[in-house]
Amino acid sequence: MGRRTEQIEYEQMLLQRHSLGSLDTRHFLERSAYILLSRIRVQGPMSIGELSEALRLDASTLNRQTAAAVKAGLLLRIPDPDGGIARKFAVTELGGEKLDAQRELTVNGLDLLMSEWSDEEIATFGACLKRFNMDIERHLGQIWPRPT
């Protein structure tokens, strides 16, 4: 390991393969729905075009994902609140409940995994992970909105 970032590359690859919610056998949302609902909840109703740009996915992939989410009752197609032509997707009450439940599973998994970490270690890791993500977002020119 000659380069400073080789360990980070490998650990980041491993992190991507883990699903922290999988520590609990209940799954409320598939990964794609979890990301989709999370983005719409934070940003507000979004069109396929807006989702495509935000998530860096092609429209056909998003059409499949949103159709499945609408069929499952997680998303609802609505007229553009700003009066635009394109219809937008909004999170339904059921979608919000399932998103909250999935988040709770993930947080519980993190609590379990990090039970021996100090508050300072958790805060430092969270700050470094946020900085890492924000640097990626700045590099790509696509800042991901964060909950307040």
Image (tube, rainbow, N blue to C red):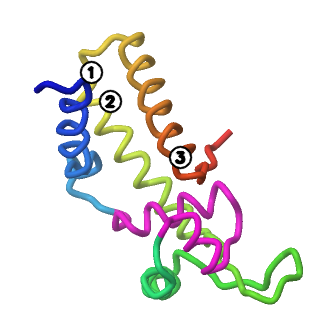
Residue 94 horizontal/vertical position (percent): 54, 70
Q: Earlier in the sequence, mark 2 or mark 3?
A: 2
Would you say 24 lies left or right of 74 here? left
Counting labels gives 3
Q: Main secondary structure of the magenta part?
A: helix
Where does label 3 land, which residue?
Answer: 137
Q: Quadrant of the C terminus?
A: top right
Residue at x-position 87% and y-position 75%: 82
Q: Amino acid at mark 3?
A: Glu
Circle number at residue 115: 1
Which contiguous range is marked in magenta? 28-56
Comparing marks 2 and 3, which lies closer to the viewer?
A: 3
Would you say 60 lies left or right of 110 here? right
Labels 2 and 3 touching (C-beta < 8 A)? no
Residue 125 horizontal/vertical position (percent): 38, 23
Labels 2 and 1 touching (C-beta < 8 A)? yes
Q: Vertically, is 70 above or below 34?
A: below
